[in-house]
Image (cartoon, coloured by chain):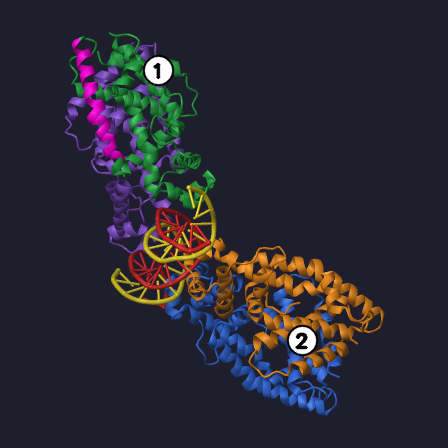
Chain colours: A green, B purple, C orange, D blue, E red, F yellow
DNA sequence: CATGAATGAGGATTCATTCAT
DNA sequence: TATGAATGAATCCTCATTCAT
C-alpha cells in the first residue's frame, strides 16, 4: 500500500473508478509541479499546458476551471493523508501486527507511515499548506475529515492510553492531540518543506521525536 | 515594549527615524489586511488603493512595485519576531529578572513574550507564512536572521542547559532546537492561524506546552 | 517583381514560407498606418486593435511586445530597400538589359526602381526614418546591410566608373557615395515625406536629378 | 554672431526680451538633451525635472504643458536656422564682404555658416527632424518661414544667377532650389545626425559639396 | 516662486476561458 | 476528442498635470 504517489495512484485505480487518460495525468502532473513551485495564483494555465504538452483548451475540456483543477489535485491529498487515522481497513493494515501494542509503537508506526507518504507527495503537501487558507472548499473538506473522522478516533485512543497510565492525566485530551500533532506534523514540515535540502538522519530524528512525545506527555 | 503592533510602531517611531505619512500608513494597513485575506498574488493594487482610500498611483509613489510593498510589510516582521532571541538589549529586557534562571522560566518568558507579539500581529504572521516560499528576498532575510543570529545563540543556551543536566544529553542540540521550536511555533500557529476562533484557555495551553517540552527533553 | 507593397508581399509569399493570417495582416496594416501618422511612442496598442478590428489581446498573441510589432514592420523595409544594391539576382533583374551600361543609365534604373518601391511603401519609409534613431535593433540592421553589403558594392562601382573617366577622380569615393546617396534619397524623401502633396512632375524631376549628379561628379 | 548655442542665446538676450531665469535655462537644457536622446513622446517630465535639478511642478510653472516646453525649444530653431536666408541685417552681415560675389562664394559662405550653426545645435536639429512630422504647430511655423520668407528670396537669387549664366537654364528654379537644399541639408544631416562619430575632414567635404553643386547645376 | 505629494486616466501586457475547426 | 486562435476584462504601472503648503 501507498508505494505509489497520489498521482500515480489516481491514474491506475481500476476498482470501478474511472482511470485518468494519459493527457489528464500529464496535466495533473504538470499542474502539481508548477503550483508547488510558484503557487496557484501565480501559475498560468498556458504554462501548465506547455509543461504538460497539451493544448490550453484540453485542460478546460477535463477541468471546467483552473480552480477545479486545483481541487482535483489537492482534495484527495487531504483524504489520503488522514485515511490511516480513520478508515478501518487502513487502520488494520497499518496496525495489524500486535493487538495490544504500546502507544510508543503505535506512534512509531504512524510517524513512519505518514513520513513515507509525504516523502512520496512533497509537492502536494506544499500546495495544500499554501492554498488551504484561500479556498473554502479545502477548509471544509479538511474540517470534515479531521473534526468529523480523525479527531473522534484520536480522542478515544488518547483516553485509552491515559487510562492505561501511559499518558499523564494532567493533560486535557485536546491538548494531548494538539501537542502530538504539532510535533509530528511540525517534524514532517520541517523535514520536507522548510529544510528539504538539509542532511537529515531520518531514523534518528524519528526516534528522538517519538521519545520527545512519549516523555513530554508523562 | 511591544505593546503596539508592528504597523503602529512603524508609524510612530520618532527617535529620529522617518515617520510614515498617514497615507502610507493607510496603504500598509490596507495591503496587510488584504494580503492576509486573499494572498499576495490574488490581491490587486486597485483593491488596496480602494480600501486605503487613496488613488492607485499613490501606492506607486511610495512603493516602486507591488512586491516592494509586500517586502516592506513582511521584512520587518522577520526581524521583529526574532529580535528577542538575539539582540542583547532585548534579551536583557526580556530576561532581566534573575541571573541563573531555570530554563523552564526562560521558556515561559519566551513563549509568553512571542505569544503576545503574534497576538498583535496575526495578519503579518499569516502573510509571512504564505509568501516566504515564493520570494527569495524573504528566504534570504529569514536565513540571515535565523541561521546567522538566532541559531548560534540557541545552540549555546541548549549546550549550557544540557551541561547543567536540565536537558538530556541523549539529544543532539540541533534536534533539541528543532523540537522546541516546532512545539512553540506550532502552538502559536495553531492558536492564531489554524484555529483562531476556537475557545482557548491560553494560560493553560502555555503551561502545558512548557511542561511538554520540559519533560520531553529529559 | 515589386509590384506589391511590402505588406501585401508578406501576406502572399507562398513559396513555402509562412503566410500571414488575415488578422495578422490587419494588425500589421493598422499598426503601420498609425505608426506613420503619430509615431511609435504615441500610438497605443488599443488604438491599433480598434483600427485592425481585433481584440487587443490578439495583437499580443502574434507579437510578444509592441516593440516586436514595430520591428516586424520596419526590419524588412531596411532589407527590401537595399536589396537591389547587393543581391546578385536582383541586380541582374534590375540591370539585365545591357552589359556595359553607361553609369547614367545605371543611375536612372536605380532611381526609378527605388522611387517606385518607396511610392508603394511611403508609410514604411516614414516610420523607418522616425524610429531608427531610437531603436538599436534597427540601427544594427541598417549598419549590417549598408556597411556590410551595399557600401562595398558601391565602392567598387564608383572606382570602376572613376577609372573609366565618367566620374572625376578629384573626388574621394566615399564622398561620391555620400553625394549620390543624399541626392537620390533626399529627392525621394522630399518627394514622399516632406512634400507628398505638392504637384510633382516625377519624370522631369528624375531626369534633372540624374543630370545634376552626372554633371556634379565630373 | 552665432558663437553661442541657441539656448545660451535665449538666456542672455537682453535687448528688450525677457531673460530666462537660471531654473528655466536648466529645464530647457535638460529637456533638450533628453528629447534628443529618446524622443519627445518617450521623455517624461519627471525625468526632465530630475536632470534639471528642479521639482516637477516647477516645469509646469514655466511651461503650461509638456508640449509647450517642446515648442519653446524647437520653434526658435526653425527661425534661427532660416534667418540668414531672409533677414536683411543678417544677410548683410553674412554676405557683407563683396557686392557682386560669385554664387560659388555665396554658397560657401552659406554652407560654412549653417554648418557651424548646426554644429553648435546638434540636439536641436535632431529634435526638429524627429518631431516636425507630429506637431502641426511646427509644420506651420516651418511653412511660414520657408515658403513665406526663404523661398521667395531664393527664387530671386536663383533667377539672377541663371540669368548670369552661372546656373543652366535647363533647370526649373524650384528644382534648383530642391537640389541645392537637399545637397546642403543632406550633407549637414549626414555629418551631424547620421554619422556624427565618423572621422570627417570637414573642409574637404564642404569644398567637394560646393563643387558638386556648382558643376551639377551647369 | 518653488515644491513634491497626490491624482486618475491611460498604457502595455497577461490570462482564464470559449469556440470553430 | 483535441486544438489553439481569439477574446476582453483585469493587472501592474506610468505620467502629465494640479494644488496645498
The outermost residue toward the right is: C164
Quick one: C5 or A203, which is closer to the camera? C5
What residue lies at 55% left-to-right and 64% top-to-bottom? C131
- For marks 1 and 2, give the CA distance: 88 Å
What residue lies at 66% left-to-right and 71% top-to-bottom? C114
Q: Please determine if labels 1 and 2 lie on a single subunit.
A: no
Disc on res. A206? 1
Q: Provide the chain ID for the residue under circle 1.
A: A
Q: Position of residue C124 (x, y in %)?
A: 56, 67
Mark 2 lies on a secondary structure that is helix
Which residue carries the number 2 mark? Answer: D183
Observer able to see residue C73: yes
Mark 1 lies on a secondary structure that is helix
Quick one: C68 or B19, which is closer to the camera? C68
Q: Position of residue C21 (x, y in %)?
A: 51, 58
Observer able to see residue B157: no
* Magenta part of the chain: A138-163
Give the quarter of the image for residue B13: top left
Amino acid at each position: 500500500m501507498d508505494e505509489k504517489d497520489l498521482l500515480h495512484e489516481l491514474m491506475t485505480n481500476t476498482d470501478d473508478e474511472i482511470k485518468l487518460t494519459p493527457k489528464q495525468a500529464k496535466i495533473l502532473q504538470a499542474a502539481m509541479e508548477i503550483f508547488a513551485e510558484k503557487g496557484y495564483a501565480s501559475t498560468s494555465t498556458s504554462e501548465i499546458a506547455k509543461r504538460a504538452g497539451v493544448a490550453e483548451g484540453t485542460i478546460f475540456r477535463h477541468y471546467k476551471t483552473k480552480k477545479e483543477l486545483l481541487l482535483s489535485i489537492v482534495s484527495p491529498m487531504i483524504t489520503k493523508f488522514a485515511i490511516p487515522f480513520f478508515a478501518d481497513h487502513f487502520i488494520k493494515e497499518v496496525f495489524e501486527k500486535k493487538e495490544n501494542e504500546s502507544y510508543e509503537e503505535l506512534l512509531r508506526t504512524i510517524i513512519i507511515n505518514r513520513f513515507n507518504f509525504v516523502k512520496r507527495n512533497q509537492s502536494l503537501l506544499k500546495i495544500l499548506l499554501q492554498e488551504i487558507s484561500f479556498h473554502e472548499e479545502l477548509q471544509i473538506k479538511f474540517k470534515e475529515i479531521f473534526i468529523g473522522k480523525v479527531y473522534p478516533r484520536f480522542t478515544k485512543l488518547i483516553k485509552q492510553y491515559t487510562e492505561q497510565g501511559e499518558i499523564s492525566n494532567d493533560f486535557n485530551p485536546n491538548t494531548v492531540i494538539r501537542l502530538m500533532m504539532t510535533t509530528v506534523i511540525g517534524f514532517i514540515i520541517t523535514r520536507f518543506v522548510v529544510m528539504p535540502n538539509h542532511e537529515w538522519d531520518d531514523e534518528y530524528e524519528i526516534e528522538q521525536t517519538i521519545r520527545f512525545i512519549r516523555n513530554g506527555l508523562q
